């Protein structure tokens, strides 16, 4: 005879479900009820049985299994004295294990304070949160603390990029189209012997504009690049035509690594595939490799190129200007995102910036949340083909 799951065990299961929701795993009230009913027929004293039961009910996607395992270990951690003694002993650097992807997000979800019970406290907490959001909108990424970066990361994950459609030369059946579909019209008239003719029309096919991102991973761009990778991961789910390349002293394609469902796992895969993170900068050489090996593959069909770099090239010469001009001619639109624009009195004095600036269509900042939101507005509306004859925004 099984014992109903009530009291402290039920409270723990409900709290565990809330922690999973905070960590990004969708768990509804129906799943919680199913979990409580399922725990009545298993041995609650067996940790493996409880883990397997809750995992079978709460986890519906493969990418959520890692988050569930980490949350389970943290939430239902054993309380033996020897374990606490071992946790208090500092380990040497070579013995410390690197936390797996997603561990930071799980720890933040479990450490979130509960909402205050009084309405006055809730109103004050809400007012403070709104004020904090206003501050974070314009605060530089490089000046943020670890807690603020975590808040910005969560805000970036919620960003959506509207589909900026490009009109192609291909046609598809469209009742409101402007072109006559003679073949389908004649084929339909055969059914009535030509007495009644139903006019069929064709319309242009619209596809989302491809996005190609080239991110500088030198030491001065490290913080900005990591947060912008979160933005690219957020828009990759809705827009599969996103190609991402990292460059420092060499060029690395991380498009496939960034397509992982979990953002922490995606960024961990990107970091593992790059050997020159936070190193030097060779923009001209990296652009040459991109134009030669990847240009024809990813720059077709009106691609929009996002170049994220401060432009501080050590080997600024005619090769850099040539490769920038080649990249500009190969894409539909070239947007340069430079964190140095956060300074009000910015002037293009560096030799590398002077060579790169004439070959871009837009020159925008990328140092805070407001600048990323401005980029979303710019990407949502694709200019016409003749946009390069217009005055550039910051040239």
Image (spheres, rainbow, N blue to C red):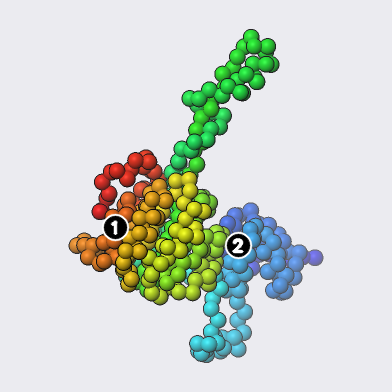
Count every numbered label the image shows and give the total: 2
Q: Residue at x 55, y 87 (%)?
A: 95
Q: Residue at x 50, y 87 (%)?
A: 93
- Residue 86 visible: yes
CA neighbours of label 1 inside 10 A, class few (<14), some (14 to 19), many (20+): some
Q: Which residue is drawn at 44% across and 46% down?
A: 302
Residue situated furthest right in the rendering: 1
Residue 110 position (above or below residue 243): below
Q: Distance between the residues labelled 1 and 2?
A: 44 Å
Q: x and y percent of residue 316 in the render?
A: 31, 68
Q: x and y percent of residue 123 in the render?
A: 36, 57
Instruction: Say left or right for 62 vs 394.
Output: right
Name which quarter of the figure residue 193 lies in. Answer: top right
Residue situated furthest top in the rendering: 195
Q: x and y percent of residue 52 in the render?
A: 70, 67
Between 162 and 201, the residue placed more toward the observer is 201
Dot in front, 1 or 2: 1
Q: x and y percent of residue 359 in the render?
A: 32, 54
Residue 96 position (above or below residue 176): below
C-beta proximity under 8 Å, tags 1 and 2: no
Name the quarter where the N terminus is drawn.
bottom right
Q: Which residue is tagged 1? A: 357
- On residue 64, the disc is 2
Between 97 and 37, the residue placed more toward the observer is 97
CA neighbours of label 2 inside 10 A, class few (<14), some (14 to 19), many (20+): many
State the SS at label 2. Answer: helix
Instruction: Say left or right for 99 vs 304.
Output: right
Between 266 and 199, the residue placed more toward the observer is 199
- On residue 240, the disc is none
State the SS at label 1. Answer: helix
Q: Residue at x 64, y 19 (%)?
A: 188
Badge 1 or badge 2: first in the primary sequence: 2
């Amino acid at each position: 005879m099984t014992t109903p799951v009530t009291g402290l065990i039920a409270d723990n299961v409900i709290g565990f479900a809330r922690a999973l929701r905070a960590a990004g795993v969708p768990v509804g009230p129906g799943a919680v009820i199913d979990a409580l009913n399922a725990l009545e027929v298993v041995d609650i004293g067996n940790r493996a049985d409880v883990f397997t039961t809750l995992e079978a009910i709460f986890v519906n996607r493969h990418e959520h299994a890692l988050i569930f395992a980490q949350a389970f270990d943290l939430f239902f951690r054993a309380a033996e004295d020897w374990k606490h003694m071992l946790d208090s002993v500092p380990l040497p650097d070579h013995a410390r294990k690197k936390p797996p992807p997603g561990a930071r997000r799980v720890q933040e979800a479990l450490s979130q304070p509960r909402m205050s019970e009084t309405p006055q406290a809730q109103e004050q907490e809400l007012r403070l949160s709104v004020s904090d959001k206003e501050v974070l909108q314009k605060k530089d990424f490089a000046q943020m603390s670890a807690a603020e970066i975590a808040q910005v990361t969560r805000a970036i994950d919620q960003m959506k990029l509207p589909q900026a459609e490009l009109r192609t030369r291909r046609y598809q059946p469209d009742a409101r189209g402007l072109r006559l579909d003679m073949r389908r019209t004649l084929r339909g008239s055969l059914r009535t012997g030509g007495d009644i003719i139903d006019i069929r029309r064709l319309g242009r096919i619209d596809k989302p504009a491809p996005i190609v991102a080239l991110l500088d991973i030198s030491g001065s761009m490290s913080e900005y690049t990591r947060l912008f990778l979160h933005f690219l991961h957020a828009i990759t789910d809705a827009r599969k035509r996103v190609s991402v390349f990292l460059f420092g002293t060499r060029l690395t394609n991380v498009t496939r690594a960034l397509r992982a469902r979990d953002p922490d796992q995606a960024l961990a895969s990107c970091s593992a595939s790059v050997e020159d993170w936070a190193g030097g900068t060779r923009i001209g050489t990296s652009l040459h490799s991109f134009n030669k090996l990847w240009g024809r593959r990813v720059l077709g069909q009106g691609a929009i190129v996002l170049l994220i770099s401060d432009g501080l090239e050590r080997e600024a010469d005619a090769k850099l200007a040539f490769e920038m001009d080649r990249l500009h001619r190969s894409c539909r639109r070239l947007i340069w995102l430079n964190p140095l624009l956060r300074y009000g009195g910015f002037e293009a004095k560096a030799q590398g910036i002077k060579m790169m600036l004439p070959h871009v269509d837009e020159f925008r900042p990328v140092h805070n949340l407001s600048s990323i939101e401005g980029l979303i507005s710019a990407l949502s509306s694709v200019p016409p083909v003749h946009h390069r004859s217009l005055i550039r925004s910051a040239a």
